[in-house]
Image (cartoon, helix red, strand yellow):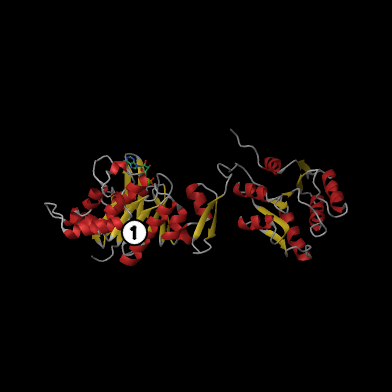
Amino acid sequence: MSAPARLSIEGVTVAFGDVSALSGVSLEVPAGDFLGLLGPNGSGKTTLLRVISRALAPQLGEVKLDGEDLRRYAPAELARRMAVVPQISVPTLDFTAGELVRMGRSPYQGRWGVETRLDREVAEEAMRLTSTLPFEGRVAGTLSGGEYQRVLVARALAQEPDLLLLDEPTAHLDLSAQIGLLELLHRLNRLQGITVVAVLHDLNLAATYCRRLAMLHRGRLVSLGSPEEVLTVERLREVYDAETLVRPHPLTGRPMVVPVPGSEGAFPEGPRPRVHLICGGGTGAGLLRALHVRGYPLTAGVLNAGDTDHAAARELGIPVAEAPPFSAFPPESMEAAGAMMEAAEVIVLTDTPFGPGNLPNLLALSKAQREGKRVLIVVPDPKRDWDFTDGAAAALRSAVESAGAERVANAAEALAALVPHRPV
Ligand code: ADP
Ligand code: MG
């Protein structure tokens, strides 16, 4: 086998009629890299793979394999260096899985296609690695999508490539087959030094297995680097128009991307006032999340560390005035909350219970209201106890209410009061 392959993609530009598919994409793929190509539907991933595999000639730019222009390779020579696993399509021909895999040997077989023992051994090994031997004799059309996908990978491996290109190879696989395939690619990359370039839809699989990621957006390369560098909340918002949380995987430290529900189409036009939330015990988490995904600047507190709302605010990156776990609020926490309330335009009080420990939040709210802040109050359910201060909290609450606070019945109403209706 020859050395691992290195790719240089230089200023590649492709248009189909007036549809621009790739605009000036330049990208170095060093020998031995495991690169994940990411991007929303239609961002140009397949087009880029087709250019790299010479299935499509770009209008501008070029691709070099080990410093040599791709166009200078003879077809069989190229097929011995590079193999492609295309995006799956329905198999139409009546070949068996074994026949399909042995076709991967054709670049080694000269003009008459004489199959040697070595060819059969390499093909069998490729089927063993992809767990496709059990259906070697089955006609491809009778295989499930996942089985057929693995046969296509086996055929590519039978080519003994130095560079392996794959287009959404896990799209039809169940979870264990997805992991199995990526583990296989990882081994081929690590142990045999095969350079891998794979279009992957699943950001978490890509982050887990790829050495580097490249992200395409509307035909342009918008980010290239380690998974940590590429997968950020801001970039996913910009490129995928999606709200996510990105957290390190507890075992690997690689980024994990988790969707934030309820964020679709959630961006109202116009100004978003700064909101401070007085909450606790989970009464504020939903509202914090809903306002956060709508782009509202937020603060919260005082909250005890370890409180559910404290954890939610921290997860969302919302600044919190905090106090130690299970303790009364110390003066420095109240000072921090006071500054937050001063900076806010609206203060929301949820139906959180009050005891002596968090009572200072109500005093601070009352003070902020006297200074002219808009206050929104979620009225507590009368059937539930919420005042554990011998009436002090209830007295403060009604004082704030009679001083002109807006009353709402629940978090959803609070949200509606804060977020202007979108024009239809
Ligand atoms: P992706 O693989 O990221 O989903 P593609 O590379 O398939 O995206 O497509 C990029 C853009 O080019 C899309 O707008 C797509 O409609 C267009 N496109 C791709 N192939 C063709 C083609 N053969 N003819 C016309 N338009 C095409
Ligand atoms: Mg595609």
Which residue occupies the foreground of this view, 188 or 133? Answer: 133
Q: Provide residue 54's location: percent of width, then percent of height.
A: 25, 51
Q: Provide residue 326's location: percent of width, then percent of height.
A: 75, 63
Tell me the quadrant of the picture where the N terminus can be found. Answer: bottom left
**Which quarter of the rendered image does ligand 1 occupy?**
top left
Which residue occupies the foreground of this view, 18 or 225? Answer: 225
Tell me the quadrant of the picture where the C terminus can be found. Answer: top right
Which residue occupies the foreground of this view, 57 or 380? Answer: 380
Residue 213 vs 88, above or below: the answer is below
Residue at x 82% of width, y 55% of height: 363
Residue 265, by quadrant, is: top right
Q: How many numbered discs, if any?
A: 1
Task: Single out the residue that lies furthest toward the top.
Answer: 424
Tell me if 198 is positioned left or right of 296 in this view: left
Tell me if 107 is positioned left or right of 127 in this view: left
Please name the amino acid that badge 1 sits on.
Answer: Val
Q: Provide residue 86's location: percent of width, then percent of height.
A: 31, 48
Label 1, on which residue? 196
Res 243 seen here: yes
Residue 157, by quadrant, is: bottom left
- Under circle 1, the secondary element is strand
